[in-house]
Amino acid sequence: MNKTFYGKLIFELSTPGRIGYSLPKMKKNDYCVSELPNHLRRSKEARLPEADELTVVRHYTNMSNNNFGVDTGFYPLGSCTMKYNPKMNEEVAGLSAFSVLHPHQPISTSQGALELYYETQKTLSEIGGMSEFTLNPYAGAHGELVGLMVIRSYHMERGDSKRTKIIVPDSSHGTNPASAAVCGLEVVEVKSTAEGTVDVEDLKPLLGDDIAGMMLTNPNTLGIFEKQIPEISRLIHECGGLMYYDGANLNPMLGMCRPGDMGFDVMHINIHKTFSTPHGGGGPGCGPVGVGPGLEKYLPNPRVVKNEDGTYSFINTETACGRISGFLGNFGIIIRAYAYLLALGKNGIAEVGPLSVLNANYIKEKLRSHYLLPIDGLCKHEFVFDGLRPEFGGDHHDPNHVTTLEVAKRLLDYGFHAPTIYFPLLFHEAMMIEPTETESKDTLDSFIEVMKQIAEEARDNRDMLKNAPHTTPVRRLDDVKAVKNAKFKYFE
Ligand SMILES: *Cc1c(COP(=O)(O)O)cnc(C)c1O
């Protein structure tokens, strides 16, 4: 770490009078000088840092090195599918034919972009086993909202207005009940069994003519495949509801099975998890929504269609559930996903599922000697440990046990991002690990080795873990305040 720059803010590197540019002396009429009206002019000098160019470059380069990303290290964040973002995707999205497009230019001049959009809709429909997809939603949660709006539109159009409840499993991702509430639906929770899947006996008494549908994540957030789907889907359909599939992490399903074939009517996919586009920091994301036969007309406006003469155009329908984004959504991200789909091709896509499942099971089996595995058996793309095993200090009954938070903080010292912790809420010390298919066996092996080493440290050198991380620029932050109350201003 460079001591001159480390931890310093650019204002602290400032020296009065220093400048970071060199321009030729201005001669009269050389530049276009615009006359600002007086009331818009500064009354005081701007408080800007004064630094030479090299200091500025080093400052920002050093700062970027403090950021952890999938390009700097292994990022096994469960439920988030932090897979590699191929650089080729960036190059394709940066082609000027795409990057300078304007949504208001004549449609005859953007046919290539619309073709890409249409082909992505088609490809996702095939992958999901759905009739049609919209790419308009900006995120997974946004997709959930749109999917639920489609379900509500379907019931309302039939005059079936009393279907105001939606069933959501207790293991669901937090966005499921939140999206349902935003859509004006009442959330009814269904419990999980000890094996971590939906408890069908708990589901039955909830069914009735007020049920709009059920949201299900499969594999669920514990990484377990919901084997009872045919039965659940039959029960929901018999009571008049629709089945919603949360396909944020479709990874393990690619090449294995399709939600449409399992009886789901509506689904969303997270492009930014499953199809290798960047995420984190709130976006830019894309949460396409697919629907089965008969529900296409409720998809939001506008939709991109292919005409008989081979050209592409937008359509807007009156039956649509509404308009949910400006223009066509995050088009730049859709380009990246399309590049990824084409790069892998049908055969490559089919390898993603098996490899992501293999990688997760490999880590799980190698680490179960040190970490508590509450749900045994084959997992899909991710799995959950319930903290350290008792012999490594993880005994929950001991108020002084070594916590998952301590393990997660210590991982940072070894250059790994921590897994998702304390989610799902079903366990005390949850630690949710998802390696994805893009990691090599060498990376998985070094992660396994470090996780074992941390378990041994927890047993033998407790205090060191309590104070971890030791090597990061900042140590134990107030996680909530750091996000909700971030300070970006040097001067108040
Ligand atoms: C990530 C995720 C979501 C939400 O997606 P966002 O793009 O973050 O809004 C929904 N469901 C599951 C299962 C997820 O993992």
Image (tube, grey):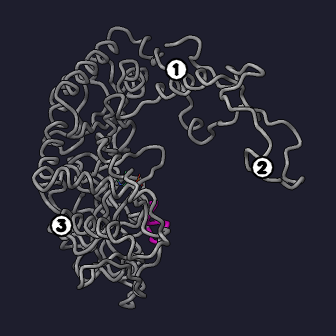
**Mark closest to the chain's N terminus, 2 or 3:** 2
Q: Residue furthest bottom?
A: 159
Q: What residue is disc 3 on?
A: 126
Q: With 104 as the anchor, is 96 left or right in this view? A: left
Vertical side of 49 occupied by 462: above or below: above
Q: Residue at x 37, y 37 (%)?
A: 420
Q: CA distance from mark 2 to mark 3?
A: 57 Å
Vertical side of 482 occupied by 139: above or below: below
Of the pair 156 and 195, the residue shown nearer to us: 156
Where disc 2 sits, the SS reads: loop
**Neighbourhood count class around disc 2 (C-alpha, 10 Å): few under 14, some 14–19, many 20 upward:** few
Q: Are marks 1 and 3 in contact (CB under 8 Å)?
A: no
Q: Quadrant of residue 18?
A: top right
Circle 3: residue type: Glu
Q: Residue at x 23, y 21 (%)?
A: 446
Q: Is residue 107 visible?
A: yes
Q: Residue at x 50, y 26 (%)?
A: 61
Total tally of numbered discs in the picture: 3
Where disc 3 sits, the SS reads: helix
**Mark closest to the chain's N terminus, 1 or 3:** 3
Of the pair 22 and 256, the residue shown nearer to us: 22
Task: Check residue 473 in the rendering and tell me which mark sits there, or answer none.
Answer: 1
Q: What residue is disc 2 on?
A: 33
| Of the two numbered discs 1 and 2 in the rendering, the one whose residue sits closer to the viewer | 2
Give the extent of the magenta segment.
178-186
Q: CA distance from mark 1 to mark 3?
A: 46 Å
Q: Per the image, is 344 magenta?
A: no
Of the pair 309 and 492, the residue shown nearer to us: 309
